[in-house]
Amino acid sequence: MKDLLFKMLADILAGTDFRLKKSDDAFIRKITDGRQTIGLSLYDYNPEFVFSLVICIRLESVETIFHLFSGSPSPEYQAMSETTITQLEYFMAAPAEFSVTTEQDVAANGRVLSGVVRGKIVPFLDKLQDVKSLDIAVNRQVPGINSTQPPYGPMTSIILAHLAGNPDYDRLVARHRADLNLPPEMDYPFNHLVEYLDKLRSAGPVP
């Protein structure tokens, strides 16, 4: 079933620069500061399979700072992280999980997904390829695009705000601290990150 779904997605993405990486269950393309991913999430309830898509962006400039405080144990694991994770629901009014048992089911769902992927997801990724555009999408849009769980989502948010020169940086820090119910003096990765970024900010603007 996975191969049928890969074939369906490959047909939808034909003519783009996304390429299948089977070991990651995803179609990936490189961008100047990282990569973008359209990933396949698949659950086997034999004979039924349920699948969805997960859309991810990784910016190396963000992850370099993030992993100073992430606690991730090795470069191998650090290389797997994503700056933003956006669920398929963001692009669809209808339910964003699909049930398939036959090749015909895959083809039918491919017809539904084709317009979403080519008409919404690919243009979305075309627009979000640097810190300034991603800062807008994460920190200035409602709803924001990032479904990454706390504290990692808030950490990404303020790194983007710092790198993009977002004038709302201090407000974002305060909001995330309130959401996390986090006193500034607590020994916690978010606070360590804020302290680090504040030192960088006091040294002058990001080049």
Image (cartoon, rainbow, N blue to C red):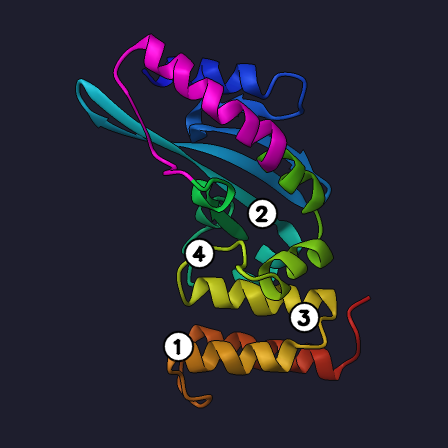
Q: What percent of the width, then of the height, locates residue 33? A: 69, 46
Label 2 neighbourhood size at 10 Å, few (<14), some (14-19), many (20+)?
many
Kindly identify the residue that appears in the image at 71 percent across and 79 percent down: 201
Q: Earlier in the sequence, mark 4 or mark 1?
A: 4
Viewer can see residue 183: yes
Give yes or no for contact between labels 1 and 3 (Cβ–Cβ under 8 Å): no
Q: For mark 1, what is the residue? A: 180
Label 1 neighbourhood size at 10 Å, few (<14), some (14-19), many (20+)?
few
**Element assignment for label 1:** helix
Q: For mark 2, what is the residue? A: 58
Q: Quadrant of the N terminus?
A: top left
Q: CA distance from mark 4 to mark 3?
A: 18 Å
Q: Is residue 13 above or below residue 198?
A: above
What secondary structure characterizes most of the magenta part? Answer: helix
Residue 139, disc: none
Q: What percent of the width, then of the height, locates residue 74? A: 44, 51
Q: CA distance from mark 2 to mark 1?
A: 24 Å
Viewer can see residue 81: no
Q: Earlier in the sequence, mark 3 or mark 2?
A: 2
Nearer to us in this view, 183 or 44: 44
Q: Quadrant of the C terminus?
A: bottom right
Q: Earlier in the sequence, mark 2 or mark 1?
A: 2
Of badges 2 and 1, the one in the foreground is: 1
**Element assignment for label 2:** strand
Q: Is residue 203 left or right of residue 186?
A: right
Q: Is residue 102 magenta?
A: yes
Kindly identify the residue that appears in the image at 53 percent across and 59 percent down: 143
